[in-house]
């Protein structure tokens, strides 16, 4: 948690908005969104690593002097396409969780302005 996040929680604990029923729920949602964002970011990193490995395999197979069957190339290509789909899905999750986090964080900050 960043220093600014710690400061927000500290201020919220001291503020009058702490007793509001929505505050605790907002705090949980911010925490959940932040954790989900971190997990989905790790999945994106793993997807990229696997994708890079498979692209390297495809390049190696296609540039080798040994004859490579079309089926082998298609298998690697299918794996790459599947990984690309996973990457896109996990990236969209990252985007969603980060947006949720920003919205919930702003709602907490809005408590101080009321």
Image: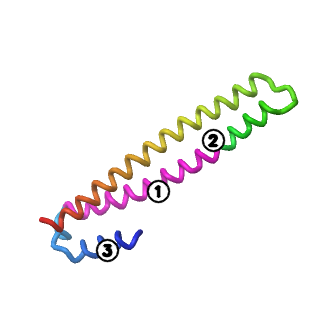
Q: CA distance from mark 2 to mark 1?
A: 20 Å
Which element type, helix, strand or loop, lies under badge 1?
Answer: helix
Mark 2 vs mark 1: in front:
2
**Residue 38, numbered circle:** 1
Report whether 6 appears left or right of 42. left
* Image location of residue 70, percent across then percent down: 76, 22
* Image location of residue 86, percent across then percent down: 53, 39
Q: Quadrant of the N terminus?
A: bottom left
Which element type, helix, strand or loop, lies under badge 2?
Answer: helix
Please name the residue shown 70% across and 28% down the image.
75
Please name the residue shown 28% across and 57% down the image.
104
* Image location of residue 87, percent across then percent down: 53, 41
Q: Which residue is mark 3?
A: 7
Q: Are marks 3 and 1 in contact (CB under 8 Å)?
A: no
- Residue range (magenta): 22-50
Mark 1, other Cα within 10 Å: few <14 / some 14–19 / many ≥20: some
Mark 3, other Cα within 10 Å: few <14 / some 14–19 / many ≥20: few
Mark 3 vs mark 1: in front:
3
Above or below — where is 16 with respect to 62? below
Q: Earlier in the sequence, mark 3 or mark 1?
A: 3
Report whether 41 appears left or right of 10. right
Q: Earlier in the sequence, mark 2 or mark 3?
A: 3
Above or below — where is 61 with respect to 3? above
Magenta segment, prevailing SS (helix, strand or loop): helix
**Residue 51, numbered circle:** 2
Above or below — where is 28 with respect to 10? above
Q: Quadrant of the C terminus?
A: bottom left
Please name the residue shown 43% across and 45% down the image.
93
Q: CA distance from mark 3 to mark 1?
A: 20 Å
Please name the residue shown 32% across and 51% down the image.
100
């Amino acid at each position: 948690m960043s220093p600014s996040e710690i400061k927000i929680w500290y201020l919220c604990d001291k503020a009058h908005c702490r007793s509001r029923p929505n505050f605790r729920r907002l705090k949980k949602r911010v925490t959940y969104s932040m954790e989900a964002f971190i997990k989905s970011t790790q999945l994106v990193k793993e997807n990229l690593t696997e994708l890079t490995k498979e692209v390297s395999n495809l390049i190696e197979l296609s540039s080798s002097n040994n004859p490579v069957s079309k089926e082998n190339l298609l298998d690697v290509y299918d794996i790459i396409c599947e990984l690309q789909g996973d990457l896109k899905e996990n990236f969209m999750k990252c985007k969603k969780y980060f947006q949720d986090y920003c919205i919930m964080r702003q709602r907490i900050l809005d408590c101080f302005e009321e």
